[in-house]
Image: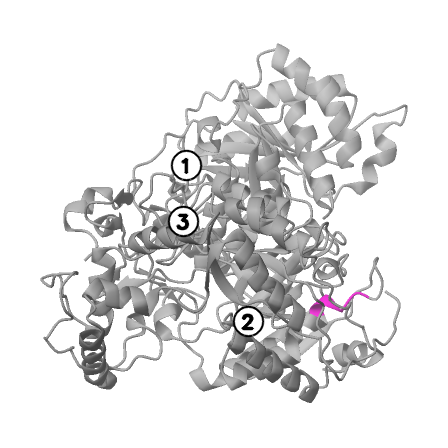
Amino acid sequence: MSTSSWPGFLAIELDGAGWVGADIARAVLAAESAGFHAATFTDAPAPGRANALQRAAFAGPVSRTIALVPEVDTVYTEPFHISTQLASLDYVSGGRAGWIVTAAESPEAAAAVGRSSATGAALGQEAAASIEVSRRLWDSWEDDAVIRDVATGRYIDVDKLHYVDFETPAGFAGAGYSVKGPSIIPRPLQGQLPVLAVASLIGDGLVPADAVDAVLVSAPTAELLAAEVRDVRARLGASVAVVAELDVVLDSLGQAAASRRESFDGGRAAYAGTAAGLTDFLADLLKEADGVRLHPASLFVDLEELGRLVLPELRRRGALRPVVQDGAFRDLLGLPRPVSRYASATASAGK
Amino acid sequence: MTQHTHAKSEVFKPSGQIQFGVFFQGVNSGTIWKAPESGSQTDFESFRRIAQTAERGLFAAFFLGEGLRLREHLGRPHALDVAGRPDAQTMLAALASVTKNIGLVATQNTTYNDPADLAHRLASLDLISGGRAAWNIVTTDNAWTGANFRRGGYLDHADRYKHAEAFVETAKRIWDSWETADGPARRVLHEGQHYTVDVTPRLPRSAQYRPVLFQAGDSPEGRNFAARQADVIFSAHPKFDDAVEFRKDLVERSLAAGRGANAVQIMPASEFILAATAEEAAEKKEWVRSLQIGPQQAVAYLEQFWGRELSAYDPDGPLPEIDPVVEETSETRGSGFHGAKARQLADQWRAEAKDKGLSIRQFVTSKTARIDSTFTGSYTAVADQLAEYARVGAVDGFNISPWLIPTGLDDIVNHLVPELQERGVYPTEYRGSTLRENLGLETPVRSADEAAEAVRA
């Protein structure tokens, strides 16, 4: 990823599509035909919100170009299961999967699984450990581990499978654990799924910057967003893509944006107004950020306006990267497909 | 959901019908990978092809297993059989978008999952699929599997059903927790020996009320568990007399558990090798068996029990005269197998093979092939055979493991299903859109007691 971010990409959060399969498909296809590069699926606990990873999986076979990026918590979940689930999402989407790492800071989430609540630096440590487990497990089958060699009767070349032997580091704030491996599923289509996290999870003693491929950056107001993007980029360096977070509510069907604004959750930069104004704002922002994630106030209402008025104009101005049919999410982020970290050890592997 | 009481039948009444499920196994020696037509075990297209073929054949359910740790052989990953499979619920959620009626059954264990999390994910799958989800409940307890999970191996083998039952009861309360389709949810509390749960569930009941429950335990404890909790038992008793006996046993246990005689359905695991004529089917069976158990697999099978490498032995020769390594039990050498028994078992097998004049390969094929669960024959003969199962109500259906991916159901759907339909023992359309409707299961009743329990507990 170079610091030159122009042209950029646009992601959209699809919360609000509900749990009915047909509605999830309608939202994803609307986002895809509008020209969005990625769809994200929040998993923050809320009444009526179905599991994000499954919503993304449902969308896999019915879409062709859009990256599917669910949030998955790392504090109260099993790292081994998460790794398998995300790798599976990559298979059902043809290599269009990504992962927004979250670290639930919630006494309710802790109580649901009977664990004590993690806070502060412990959250970053849980996230870092879980990311490391997934990344190792995704590499634990080398790309050509399935050989189907009839002559020797071997389906797998065992030398190309690897125990990951993960252990939480000394001083780990939560209950320490280990994961043996190898993965239960072959290497994901992309090799490694792109990993995203909010910028506040990244830092010393938290998630190392090189553990993620992109960070999500917020600011209190839209005016402050570009400066925040610059600050984060300066802090994390050029190897991490920076994605700006923006709430959006557009004038629609004669209804002024301001009248629909109350649905914002606050704390995030917001744009309310005309499509033309948003187009200008995004064109400028995409000169600083690699991508922008939009959080529409009302999914289907704003999605229609975005697809009709905003994205075509941004594309005309050359502000957006092309969308590629059956392209990998890594390609969109400019990430090459990595070789398994265990591949060089093949000669003495599997021991 | 209206509250009403279903009449509980004291006497088992055969439905006169059978249904099919398909089990895409992913890890086993039964799936042939050596044939030119053997497809991918991981590409989505293989799963789509099997699920859509099954749906064309009006199958009730599509099953997936759960992987917790890769099988090992003599301390390294097992190399000879198909392995490497996707997460069940992720794959089933994807298949929900390309199918309409078929049930989606996820095998999930009660040891390395948290009840609130698993219940939420199953509820999600149930809602996303429009009421087609099911949970095949399994118990796992060994430390070898636990090495991939936060808590490691924490559960004693003896406690596994007790633990599983508390888990399932908690899950049911989570699925029962919403007062109406719009909420609010009742808080669910459980304080158990191995975990506590305190959760306000996020999702309402689905079009089929809650996921259908499958269970496969075969011990007396496992059968009682199924009789109390399950909707369908995925049995290991497909042979006719055995199936009839199993039905009788399960009906007694269901009545003892306070449920109706027809409350728990039975779908044994099975394999079908079919052709236009009996002769062709017999030939096909030879071919299938030779590819399922190749020379290397035959030797490796013995190595599991001998605990040592036997590659110097000719697969077409007699069983090894060398004795097994006697050691403490190793979970990777086969469940229930203990080192002290190894010598005794080896003596027994050598004698048996010698008596019958069997080579290593022939002997292993006789031990591992689904002798009891394979239906081999012409389409018409096997249809006649299955019609008899339906007539007496020996089973409610068969859960079929295809030996070829992704074309392994084609024969069954194209030829066997029409024969069964002609005999009036197989559905001619899906009864409804939910799995519960298609299996003909009663809708659970949300009793005032259960609701109160959710609060009190």
Q: Which residue is mark 3?
A: B280
Residue drawn at point x = 71 percent, y = 75 percent? B263
Residues shaded magenta: B174-178
Chain at tag 1? A
Check if mark 3's residue and mark 2's residue have beta carbons within 8 Å.
Answer: no
Residue drawn at point x = 65 percent, y = 82 percent? B251
- Can you tell which of label 1 and label 2 is closer to the viewer? 1
Q: Which residue is mark 1?
A: A190
How far separated are the C-alphas under marks 3 and 2? 60 Å
Amino acid bearing label 2: Arg
In magenta segment, residue B175:
yes
Sequence-wise first label, 1 or 2:
2
Amino acid bearing label 1: Gln
Q: Nearer the viewer, residue A284 or A191?
A: A191
Neighbor class of circle 2 (other Cα within 10 Å; few <14, some 14-19, many 20+) is some
Chain at tag 3? B
Q: Nearer the viewer, residue B329 or A137?
A: B329
Q: Is A22 rendered above or below residue B160? A: above
Outermost residue, top side = A316
**Which percent across, then down, holds residue B51?**
57, 46
Q: Quadrant of the rendered structure where residue B296 is? A: bottom left
Q: Is the image coloured rainbow, by chain, by secondary structure, or in one colour?
A: one colour
Q: Quadrant of the rendered structure where residue B260 is? A: bottom right
Chain at tag 2? A
In magenta segment, residue B113:
no
Neighbor class of circle 1 (other Cα within 10 Å; few <14, some 14-19, many 20+) is many
Q: Is B452 rendered above or below residue B125? A: below
Q: Locate the C terminus of chain B by quadrant.
A: bottom right
Residue A115: numbered disc: 2
Q: Is B212 rendered above or below residue B280? A: below
- Residue at disc 1, secondary structure: loop
- Residue at disc 2, secondary structure: loop
